[in-house]
Image (cartoon, helix red, strand yellow):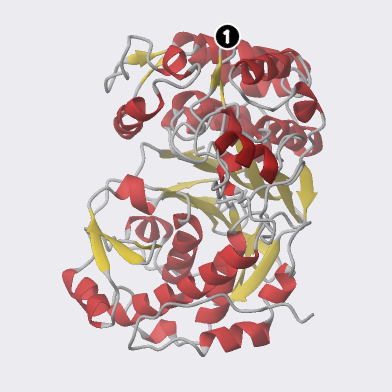
Amino acid sequence: MNFDWKTAYPSTRVPVFARNIVSTSHPLAAQAGLRMIQQGGNAVDGAIAAAAVMTVVEPCSNGLGSDAFCILWDGKKLHGLNASGPAPAAWTPEYFRKKHGADAIRPPVRGWDSVTVPGAVAGWVALSERFGTLPFADLLAPAIEIAERGYAVPVIIQQKWVAAAPLLGSLPGWAEAFLPHGRPPEVGERFAFPAAARALKAIAATRGAALYGGEIAAAAAAHSRANGGAIEASDFANYTPEWVEPIGIDTYGHRLHEIPPNGQGIAALVALGILRRFDIESLAVDGAESQHLQIEAMKLAFADVYAHVSDSRSMRCTPEEMLDDAYLAGRARLIDPKRAQVFGAGNPARGGTIYLSAADERGMMVSFIQSNYMGFGSGIVVPGWGLSMQNRGHGFVLDPASPNCVAPGRRPFHTIIPAFLTRDGRPQMSFGIMGGDMQPQAHLQTIVRMLAHRQQPQAACDAPRWRVSAGKLNVEATMAAATAAGLVERGHEVEVIQDSYQDFGAGQFIWRLGDPAVEGYVAASDARRDGQAAGW
């Protein structure tokens, strides 16, 4: 790709060039990952070390009780890992209606009844066993050290901490873990997490077994029972991550790969499959006409995804049917280039998150994402262990007619999606953008910018974004006024948003320039978070 390397937008970041790179939303995590590569490890070792550090330094977005997904290029082949956890064995629609009222439509947002089995740590172990080179315990050493010694809280993370305190302070274990002085830490104030260090040491010593059926699982189950939850140590012990084949679609001379459902990555594929029916390359990159077509394609994709996507074992159509070329062509014909519309789902059947990327000079590239879902997840923290639990159970519904209806052992609809780009069967870019339903929307926008308009990775990160949300179109305050006005003229209900972190996600990108041992890579880290791309 012959990128345009000029800086098109105001930015506090520049592209980073190196033969080995780790890009994350916190500098300490990027440096920990790079340290593993410098010690003789590979990109998988670096990614695991960075992910472990992230559970300590960005607790608003992830923790030891998170879920995770990964796409990686091992030097010869692409692999996918689904490390999202299932519902506890006791969960049924009746369980929730009995506890939370006959009119309940989904599990609660917070508390133990929003907690599914966490999969992230099991994902680390699976990646290490299959692809890692360094001892697993070595990979967790930086996270343990930081948790014990503490770190200075950065600006954006502190803002999220302050916002969460009024919502979560009364939930079991949260204030004890995250309000060490009876309040959120100040910017630059030291925060240590000795309970998480204890858990990380036990996980390191047992290669994860302490969490999956061992002493940490027993503590979590006891805390759950004491606070009205249903998850048991056996739910942890019965969990195993799943290796999956990534799904993909051809776009602008490349192929975009995503993890198959239960994740929403297929939304980006559907939108790009619709959009390729239009001559986007001929339109102004930041013009209203181009943005309108992308927005309408995304709305069509979401209509299908929210109707059909769930645990792959309960879906009533297949990803292949949703990505069928003739079906997508029919969906594209619904778009009016001059007018915004509300779309329903088609029938394709023919019958707070962290993202990081790592790449090494031997050619291994890792696209990894882990999340506790909403800010600080469920708000539950298991005392003594620093186990901050996600709230992915809220992603289920209680309607038996839905493929996403809660059931024992079923995985909920998931928002977090790592991505990977190839060209002619060879690796090109590992990337991802955090932020709930913003993620496939940002995948779409950045891919169009980079592939259709040759914007370099950092420029694609820095560019103003839009977000389809609850029938409205949110746009960043940095979007050109003429573009926003053009979208209003086409019938979009536009709301200008000042808080870029809250609404527009943040990404990390690593683009392969050529032979990794010679030309290396170029990386970008989104300025919407406190992150860094670190190279060596």
Q: Looking at this view, name the residue that lies furthest to the front.
A: 102
x then y, percent, for residue 345: 57, 75
Q: Is residue 177 left or right of residue 489?
A: right
Q: How many marks?
A: 1
Q: Looking at this view, name the residue that lies furthest to the left.
A: 481
- Vertical placement of residue 158 versus 524, above or below: above
x then y, percent, for residue 455: 39, 67
Closest to the observer, 420 or 512: 420
| Residue position for label 1 | 384
x then y, percent, for residue 64: 59, 26
The residue lying at 65 percent from left, 61 percent from top is: 309
Mark 1 closeness class: few <14, some 14–19, many ≥20 residues within 10 Å? some
x then y, percent, for residue 211: 71, 21
The residue lying at 65 percent from left, 45 percent from top is: 69
Q: Is residue 38 left or right of residue 208?
A: left
Q: Is residue 521 left or right of residue 201?
A: left
The residue lying at 73 percent from left, 37 percent from top is: 127
- Vertical placement of residue 265 versus 520, above or below: below
- Disc 1 marks which amino acid? Gly
- Vertical placement of residue 141 versus 27, above or below: above
Quadrant of res 202: top right
Closest to the observer, 330 or 448: 330
Determine if residue 42 is in view.
Answer: no
